[in-house]
Structure formats: C-alpha cells, structure tokens
C-alpha cells in the first residue's frame, strides 16, 4: 500500500482457540494480558481476517466512534454492512455488493529466498531422490470434507498409476492428517519412496524442501494454502478432490452417538446430504482448472497454463482509497 502500518498480535483465550463466537464488537474472546495493547490513537484502517479477529476490528471501530474503517479478508461471518471493504477470493460463494473486492486466488505467496534456502538445505536428503520426484501433500478431514484411510489409499493408488518409471514419491502429512493414515500408507510405498509424519518441530518439516525440489505435486483438496502455494510455483499440480460431508449432519450424528470412522454408511449418508458450502471449494478448483494451473488427479496436466494472476496491486489500491489516500 505504501502506507505506514503497525501490527497488533492477538491471543485467543483457551476456550476460543477453535470456537466460533457470534460476530460482534467485542474482546471477550481474547486474552488481553497476552495480546498487544489496543489503545488510542485509533488507526484509519484495520485489516483483519477471520471471525474472531473481525470482532477485534469491530471493537476498535466502535472505540473510534466509527471513524476507523475495516478491511476484512475472506467472506464476512456477520453482516457485510459491518465492514467497509471485504476482499473475497474466487472460492467464496457470496453475493456481489459495492463493499466486495473479488480476487482470483488468496494473496498467499512463499518468499523466494526461503525456497532458495530450503533448496540448499534439503539438497542431499530430497534433491538426490530419483527423478522425476512426485510430492503428495496430505491435509485432513474438515467439517465439509472427509479424508480417511480408504480415501488416502485410493489417492495413493492414483498417484502410483500416473507416476513416471524410475521416479520416486515423497508423501508428506500435515497437522490435520490422522495418524492412522500414515500407518496405512507406509507399507504401500516403494523402497525409494519416503513418508514424513508431521510433528510440531518446524526444523524437521520438509515442506519448503519439497516445494524447492518437487517435479510434480498432488495436493488434497481440503488445503487451500498448499494448493495456492504450489500453484504459484508453476509446477504440474493435481488436486485430489475429497468426498464431501454436511457439517450439520456430521454434528447431529455425533450428538446421537453414531460412531463412524469416516468411510462407512453413516459418512456416505452424510455425503449425500452435503450441499453447496459457503466457502465454495469447487469455485477454487474451477478457477485453476480453467486456466490450466491444475488438473484433477488422474487427468493430464496442461502444457500451456495461463500466468497465475496476482491481485496484490489492485487490493492495495482499494486499501489506499479506503484510507483516504486516493
């Protein structure tokens, strides 16, 4: 934006780390002692993302008697009228209005310097694996998608089918990947393949090294961040779309005590009841497929992908206008 800015780091109270409180101008959900201080003079614009931080932004606007303006990334969980600008990626299913600034992909990008450092650091451990190197990045089940053992095994089977002779495979789990998935995939890997089981230790995580050295990528469809970060590298990318579930039906089944590991009849019933979600993952997939930036797992990658759009400058201009600079 070319404007002066300050960062305020906010820590949630333990009971609100994953909770979804009703959106209002409130700080009741944050740990004020562990958070940066929020005090006058109030800023011209607050930039926030997500339900819980949008509440902090609304509180700041309230303290400024409405003078502060709010720019929110991703669709508002409350009324759009509460926010002055909403930057919405293509995969959100929201109605158009003057407050909406619609962009193609999230403004996610990896620092090229970090990729270069990872290329050097993992040169021996990953860079020397037989080529071409296929990287399978696994996310995990969400309230709207299912990733169980059977689905993961089917994905691995498809990856194997499309793998080039003489190449190798590196499977990496993530924070949301169930441990039993890694247990089930390990015996299916070849002698030259590898499996990373996620830990909280960032030093051990090979993610950046895989992005630096991978020749082709397969990413499960639940992980927007990994999909976008790989797409911005311009490497061949296949999306392993996951079975859908209905969050309401899943919650109801849990309250009724219906146990289902995620692959049985109950999950199939819940999948049938899965409707169009507020965050439209199909819109994200279509955006990438239509431009040749990705394919469905099993399809042949496009040779003539369109340049990946970067909406950063356009969003910055809208933010400058919101701040009264332009």
Image: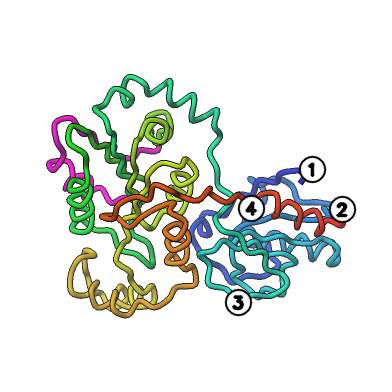
Label ID, residue 165: none
**Nearer to me, 147 or 92:** 92
Nearer to us: label 1 or label 4? 4
Quarter of the view holding residue 124: top left
Disc 4 marks which residue? 311
Name above or below for residue 77 compared with residue 296: below
Q: Which residue is mark 1?
A: 2
Instruction: State the image coordinates of residue 79 (x, y, percent, origin top left).
Output: 66, 75
Say which mark, if any, is on residue 325.
Answer: 2
Vertical order, 249 against 135 (above or below): below
Crowding near pointer 3: few (<14 within 10 Å), some, many (20+)?
few
Magenta residue span: 177-200
Residue holding disc 3: 95
Q: Say how many tags the image has.
A: 4
Q: Residues within 10 Å of mark 4 (few under 14, many from 20)?
A: some
Q: Earlier in the sequence, mark 4 or mark 3?
A: 3
Q: Position of residue 282 (x, y in %)?
A: 42, 66
| Viewer-side residue, 162 vs 59 | 162
| Secondary element at image label 4 | loop
> Is residue 171 or residue 10 the one in the foreground?
171
């Amino acid at each position: 934006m070319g404007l002066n800015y300050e960062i305020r780091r906010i820590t949630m109270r333990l009971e609100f780390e994953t909770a979804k409180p009703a959106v209002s101008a409130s700080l009741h959900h944050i740990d004020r002692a562990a958070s940066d201080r929020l005090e006058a003079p109030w800023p011209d614009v607050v930039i926030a993302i997500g339900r819980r931080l949008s509440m902090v932004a609304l509180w700041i606007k309230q303290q400024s008697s409405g003078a502060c303006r709010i720019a929110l990334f991703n669709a508002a969980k409350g009324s759009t009228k509460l926010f002055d600008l909403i930057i919405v990626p293509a995969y959100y299913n929201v109605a158009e209005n003057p407050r909406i600034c619609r962009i193609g992909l999230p403004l996610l990008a990896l620092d090229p310097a970090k990729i270069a450092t990872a290329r050097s650091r993992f040169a021996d451990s990953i860079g020397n694996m037989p080529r071409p190197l296929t990287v399978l990045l696994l996310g995990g089940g969400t309230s709207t998608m299912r990733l169980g053992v059977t689905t993961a095994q089917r994905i691995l089977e498809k990856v194997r089918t499309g793998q080039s002779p003489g190449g190798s495979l590196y499977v990496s789990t993530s924070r949301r990947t169930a441990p039993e998935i890694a247990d089930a995939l390990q015996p299916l890997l070849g002698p030259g393949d590898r499996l990373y089981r996620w830990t909280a230790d960032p030093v051990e995580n090979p993610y950046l090294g895989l992005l630096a050295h991978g020749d082709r990528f397969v990413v499960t469809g639940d992980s927007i961040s990994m999909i976008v970060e790989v797409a911005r590298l311009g490497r061949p990318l296949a999306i392993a779309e996951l079975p859908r579930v209905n969050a309401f039906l899943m919650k109801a089944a849990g309250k009724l005590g219906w146990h289902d590991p995620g692959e049985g009849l109950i999950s199939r019933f819940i999948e049938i009841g899965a409707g169009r979600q507020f965050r439209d993952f199909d819109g994200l997939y279509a955006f990438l497929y239509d431009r040749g930036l990705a394919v469905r797992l099993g399809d042949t990658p496009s040779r003539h992908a369109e340049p990946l759009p970067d909406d950063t400058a356009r969003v910055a201009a809208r933010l400058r206008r919101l701040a009264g600079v332009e």
